[in-house]
Image (cartoon, rainbow, N blue to C red):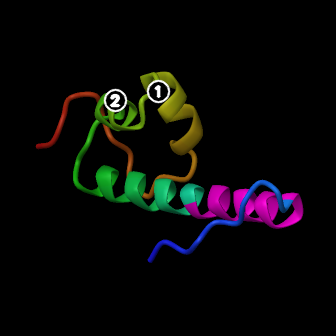
Amino acid sequence: MAAELPPPTDPAAALAAVVALRRRAEQLEYAAVDEAVRQGWTWAQVAQALGVSRQAAHKRHAGRATHRPTDEGPR
């Protein structure tokens, strides 16, 4: 799955790869957060998994998450 990354000695290709990796990482993050929310994760659990504060996770994802977690945990 992992493709060979271009060397930094080819800045155009390396920077294009950085952009593509960032986009793919964002897609994966959104999909994983959506699934975590569907499974009943709290914002605190999502935040811990992402290595950010609960407030940061909520701010980034609450507006687009398909379900709304509470901070009470799975039922």
Quarter holding residue 51: top left
Single out the residue that lies furthest toward the left: 75
Q: Which residues are magenta?
A: 11-24
The percent coordinates of residue 14 (x first, y second) are 77, 60
Can you identify the residue that label 1 sits on?
52
Residue type beneath disc 1: Val
On residue 48, which mark appears? 2
- What is the quadrant of the N terminus in the image? bottom left
User: Which of the pair 59/48 is nearer the observer?
Assistant: 48
The percent coordinates of residue 60 (x first, y second) are 58, 39
**Residue at 55% from the left image edge and 57% from the top image edge:** 25
Dominant SS in magenta = helix
Mark 2 Cα-neighbour bin, 10 Å: few <14, some 14–19, many ≥20: few
Identify the secondary structure beneath mark 2.
Answer: helix
Residue type beneath disc 2: Gln
Q: Is residue 33 above or below residue 21?
A: above
The percent coordinates of residue 45 (x first, y second) are 29, 33
User: Which of the pair 23/73 is nearer the observer?
Assistant: 23
User: Which of the pair 28/39 is nearer the observer?
Assistant: 28
Q: Is residue 66 left or right of residue 10?
A: left
Q: Is residue 65 left or right of residue 15?
A: left
Q: Is residue 67 left or right of residue 40?
A: right
Mark 1 Cα-neighbour bin, 10 Å: few <14, some 14–19, many ≥20: few
Q: Is residue 47 magenta?
A: no
The percent coordinates of residue 29 (x first, y second) are 48, 53
Q: Is residue 62 left or right of residue 32?
A: right
**Residue at 88% from the left image edge and 63% from the top image edge:** 12
Identify the secondary structure beneath mark 1.
Answer: loop
Mark 2 to mark 1: distance in Å? 6 Å
